[in-house]
Structure formats: structure tokens, C-alpha cells
Image (cartoon, rainbow, N blue to C red):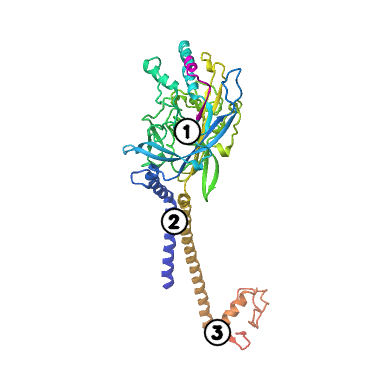
């Protein structure tokens, strides 16, 4: 009874382990996904919200300026292929903050603006802000570019203005003036005054020119964003819904004008190698696709690397789906035309040193050396959680110079894309956060191991019970044989010993003597049957059968 109760209990436990393991195997990933969604989704009281609103990471904003070492007026008699020297980095520490945050519970979105403050870090910079830099005269080039579609008389007025203000195709300014401080320019004042008089319509919101002018502490430069919080549908986490209150931009043809992809900080969990990583950039007024390139390991954490390739900056030359970004021009692949969202200035964005661009752009400039490790734009991400581990954002600002037949300063100018500067924002999350991600990413695997242990233990218990039953059955058979031997007066020990020896010896036509049994009669070939026989045990451990 004791064995029976124990076997029943072990059987129940084994079946319970197998059942529990099977149920957990079916629902484990759904449970994990649900818990992960609660941790990642953006909410007023979630941990991720404060990290997003006021990032604790140290952000470096490195700027490299191109110094024009052989400046000329780009005329037929004076032209010389520009030779550029890269100066920098000029390192700025960036403090980013989300402002004007507003929750929209009806559609699970959040609206906000970005405010960034920059501090120059001289001890970590190669250059100084007082460095003199010779570069392309972007204001003069923009004036000629803006007037290219005006009438002849208006173009000549612009040409006279350039001559009157003694403009050249290049300027010499301090690094601080070219960046955040800006510098005053008579052409800007003249354009604003003429616009007020109604001579032409221009929308120039600046009183100075500088590539980063008014960027410091500005809430308006990047625009107004509305993104999904992931509440109710974690696959929508971080996706841009509107930019400047619209789901589309006015700067490109459809579907390239769509506001799509991440706002830049949040990505949905479950990223794949096949699907590109897309984000929307307000300063480019467009989205950018990054493509999977490799799988890497950072501090023991497996990550996917998504990089901007030649496809990312194509304009339809090689990949037709990007033709809507440049519908009215035919340029080699490698530059993004953002002039429409830069107040008409002929500004084109590429990767540093025209990395991943058509060789066409390098033939007009000396001093550029594209290098993947230095100039690639990439994001490394833990794919299961969708959390970026390292970001290296690298872009170059170029000014397109074109010949203008009715404007003397650019009458004989070649068509070229003149690099002004490039910048880099590179950041990696702290090792403590990587450790947390490692645990989160390995949780599903650990869960399945535990499930496997439960199921295995269940099967072990069932096998153990079966073995116990087989053993008990064998024991009962042995006891039965002992009882038969005792009935015939044979000691148990001798009976067991002789039975074993008998079982190990074959019968040979009834003539073979079995073990220590001494039969006086020849054994019959038929089954042994000895009725009325008496067994006699002697001291030589033999048994004599007497009739």
C-alpha cells in the first residue's frame, strides 16, 4: 500500500510538471511581450518617459569645417580646382530637453518640441572658435540661386547688388561666426528691405548667417512632433504621426512627402534584418532609411547594425522608389536636396566626404577621403527590445554652385557641390543599461530553459514510476518461486542457486546432466513431467529423484 500511494503521488507530480511546462510554453512569449510592452511604452509615470524627456546621457556634437586653401572667384581665367583642408573637431556638449509636452489619450500619441543647448568644450576640441576659415560664400550663392527663375531685369539687379557690396565666391570668417554666432551680411539686410517694399517675396527669418545660427536653445528649429506612445499597440511605439501638425510635408512628391518612421528615439520591439530602420528628421524635412548590414556584439549583447547606404541617399537614379525625392532634377546618387525646407538656399546633404555617393562629386574637389569607419551613419540596436545601443549620426552640408548667365559673379562658374562642414553625434548607452538589456533580451531563452526543466522532470518522474512497477512485478514473481521451493522441502538458497544454473544450461536431447542435479533417468525430449516423484537432498548439494 505504501508503494502504491507513493507511485500515485509521483505520477500526479510528473503529469503536473509536464502540463505546467506545456501551458507555459504556449503562453510564455505572450506573457513576456506583454510585460515588455508595459516597460517600453511611453506614459506620464513610466521610467522611459523621464529618460526620453530629459536624457541623462552625455551628448557630444562634433563639427568639422572645410578650409578652402586655394580660394578663387570660379571664373574661367581664375578657376582652380578647390583644395579643402578638414579642420576640427570643434566639440560642443549638447543638453537636450523635450518641451511643450502634451498627451493625447484618445489616440495614444504625445506631442512635443525639442530644445537643445550647446556648450563649447575647448579642451576636447582640436580647433578654437577664433580660427579663421576660408569657405564658400553661401549667402552670395543663395542669392544667385534664388534669382535664377526671375526675369532678366531682376537678375541684373541682383548682379549689381553683388558687385555693389563687393561680394566674392568665398569668405573668410572665424569658426564661431560660421557656426552658432553668425555674422552680419549686407545682402541679407538688402533682401529683407526689398521684400518689405514688395520688390520680390522672400521669407528670410534671420538677420545673420551661420550654419548653426539660432539653433542654440531653439524650440522651433526641428519643428513640432507627434508620435505614438505604444500604449495599446507596442508595434506603433515611437512612430511619427505628424510633423508641424501635418501627416505630410510640402517639400517632396508623394509618397516621399509622408511623415513616417521613428521620431529618432523610440523604436518598436521585434526589429528584423529584412525591414529597414526608418526615422523622420525635422531638419531634413524628410525620412531616412537605414538598412541592416551586420550582427555585432557589444559588451556581451547581440545587436543589429543598421547603416545608411548608397540606397539611403539615392534620388531615383538606382532605386526608383526614391525618385519622388528629386522629381525635377537629374543628379547622380549621393546627395539629398533639402533646399525647399531651407528657405530656397541650394543646400544639399550627403554623408561626410561624399561617402556612399557617386564618384561624380569627388572629381571637382581635392582633399576628400571617404572612409566607412569615420563617415558612416549607423544605429546599432538590440532587436528584441528595439532599444538603440549606439548611434553615430554623421551628415555633411554642401552648397551647390551653378553658372548663372545673367549674374556676373557666377557667369562662368562650374557646377559643383562645395562641402562647407560635416558633423557627428555619436553616443553609446552606459554599460549598466547594456547589462539590463542583456538580461531583458535573454529572459525569453531563460524562460524556455525553465519550461524545459519542468517538462523533463515530469518525464523523469513518470519513467521512475514505471521502473518501480516493473521492479515490484519481478519481486512478486521471485517470491512465488520461493514459495514453491519451500513446499517441496528445498532450502531457498539452494533452490535459487540451482534454478539460476539450470536456466543458464541448454537441454541437449535429454542426455545432459543439469548443473548439480543428478538425474538417474535419461531426460525425455518431451516436456519434463515427473508425477509421484520424491525429491531427496544430499550433502553434496545434489537432488535425487526417486520414483
Instruction: Give the CA separation, mark 1 to mark 2.
Output: 65 Å
**Residue at 58 percent of width and 27 percent of height:** 361
Instruction: Give the CA separation, mark 2 to mark 3.
Output: 53 Å
Closest to the camera, between mark 2 and mark 3, is: 2
Q: Is residue 320 visible?
A: no
Magenta region, residue range: 160-173
On screen, residue 226 above or below 491: above
Dot 2: element? helix
Q: Earlier in the sequence, mark 1 or mark 3?
A: 1
Give how far across and how far down residue 522 sits, in percent: 66, 79
> Within the image, what quadrant is residue 212 found in?
top left
In the displayed structure, does residue 510 sit left or right of residue 486?
right
Nearer to me, 356 or 523: 356
Crowding around mark 2 (Cα neighbors within 10 Å: few <14, some 14 to 19, many 20+) is: many
Q: Earlier in the sequence, mark 2 or mark 3?
A: 2
Q: Earlier in the sequence, mark 1 or mark 2?
A: 2
Q: Single out the residue that lies furthest toward the bottom.
A: 539
**Residue at 48 percent of width and 56 percent of height:** 449
In the displayed structure, does residue 421 sit left or right of residue 43?
right
The residue pinned by badge 2 equals 21
Q: Which mark is residue 176?
A: 1
Amino acid at each position: 500500500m505504501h508503494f502504491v500511494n507513493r507511485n500515485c503521488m509521483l505520477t500526479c507530480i510528473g503529469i503536473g510538471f509536464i502540463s505546467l511546462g506545456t501551458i507555459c510554453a504556449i503562453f510564455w512569449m505572450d506573457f513576456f511581450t506583454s510585460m515588455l510592452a508595459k516597460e517600453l511604452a511611453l506614459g506620464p509615470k513610466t521610467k522611459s518617459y523621464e529618460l526620453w524627456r530629459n536624457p541623462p546621457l552625455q551628448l557630444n556634437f562634433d563639427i568639422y569645417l572645410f578650409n578652402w586653401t586655394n580660394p578663387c572667384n570660379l571664373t574661367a581665367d581664375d578657376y582652380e580646382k578647390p583644395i579643402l583642408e578638414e579642420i576640427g573637431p570643434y566639440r560642443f556638449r549638447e543638453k537636450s530637453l523635450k518641451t511643450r509636452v502634451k498627451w493625447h489619450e484618445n489616440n495614444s500619441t504625445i506631442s512635443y518640441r525639442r530644445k537643445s543647448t550647446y556648450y563649447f568644450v575647448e579642451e576636447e576640441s582640436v580647433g578654437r572658435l577664433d580660427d579663421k576659415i576660408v569657405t564658400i560664400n553661401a549667402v552670395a550663392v543663395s542669392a544667385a540661386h534664388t534669382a535664377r527663375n526671375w526675369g532678366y531685369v531682376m537678375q541684373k539687379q541682383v548682379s549689381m547688388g553683388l558687385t555693389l557690396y563687393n561680394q566674392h565666391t568665398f569668405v573668410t570668417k572665424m569658426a564661431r561666426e560660421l557656426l552658432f554666432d553668425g555674422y552680419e551680411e549686407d545682402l541679407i539686410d538688402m533682401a529683407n528691405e526689398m521684400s518689405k517694399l514688395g520688390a520680390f517675396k522672400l521669407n528670410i527669418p534671420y538677420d545673420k548667417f551661420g550654419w548653426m545660427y539660432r539653433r542654440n536653445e531653439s524650440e522651433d528649429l526641428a519643428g513640432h512632433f507627434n508620435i505614438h506612445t505604444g500604449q495599446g499597440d507596442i508595434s506603433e511605439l515611437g512612430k511619427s504621426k505628424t510633423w508641424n501638425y501635418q501627416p505630410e510635408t510640402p517639400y517632396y512628391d508623394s509618397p516621399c512627402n509622408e511623415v513616417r518612421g521613428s521620431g529618432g528615439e523610440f523604436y518598436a520591439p521585434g526589429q528584423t534584418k529584412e525591414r529597414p530602420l526608418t526615422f523622420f528628421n525635422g531638419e531634413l524635412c524628410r525620412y531616412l532609411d537605414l538598412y541592416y548590414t551586420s550582427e555585432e556584439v557589444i559588451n556581451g549583447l547581440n545587436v543589429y547594425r543598421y547603416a545608411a547606404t548608397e540606397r539611403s541617399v539615392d534620388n531615383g537614379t538606382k532605386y526608383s522608389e526614391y525618385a519622388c525625392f528629386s522629381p525635377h532634377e537629374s543628379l547622380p546618387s549621393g546627395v539629398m536636396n533639402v533646399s525647399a525646407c531651407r528657405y530656397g538656399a541650394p543646400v544639399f546633404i550627403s554623408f561626410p566626404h561624399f561617402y556612399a555617393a557617386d564618384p561624380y562629386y569627388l572629381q571637382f574637389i581635392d582633399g576628400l577621403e571617404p572612409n566607412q569607419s569615420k563617415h558612416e551613419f549607423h544605429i546599432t540596436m538590440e532587436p528584441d527590445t528595439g532599444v538603440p545601443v549606439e548611434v553615430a549620426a554623421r551628415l555633411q552640408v554642401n552648397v551647390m554652385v551653378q553658372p548663372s548667365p545673367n549674374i556676373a559673379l557666377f557667369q562662368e562658374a562650374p557646377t559643383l557641390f562645395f562641402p562647407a562642414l560635416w558633423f557627428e553625434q555619436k553616443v553609446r548607452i552606459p554599460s549598466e543599461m547594456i547589462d539590463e538589456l542583456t538580461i531583458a533580451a535573454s529572459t525569453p531563452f531563460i524562460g524556455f530553459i525553465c519550461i524545459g526543466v519542468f517538462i523533463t522532470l515530469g518525464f523523469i518522474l513518470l519513467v521512475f514510476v514505471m521502473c518501480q512497477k516493473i521492479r515490484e512485478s519481478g519481486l512478486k514473481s521471485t517470491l512465488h518461486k520461493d514459495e514453491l521451493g519451500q513446499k517441496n522441502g528445498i532450502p531457498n538458497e539452494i533452490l535459487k542457486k540451482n534454478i539460476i544454473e539450470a536456466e543458464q544450461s541448454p537441454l541437449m536431447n535429454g542426455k545432459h546432466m543439469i548443473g548439480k542435479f543428478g538425474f538417474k533417468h535419461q531426460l525425455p525430449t518431451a516436456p519434463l513431467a515427473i508425477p509421484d516423484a520424491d525429491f531427496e537432498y544430499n550433502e553434496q548439494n545434489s537432488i535425487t529423484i526417486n520414483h
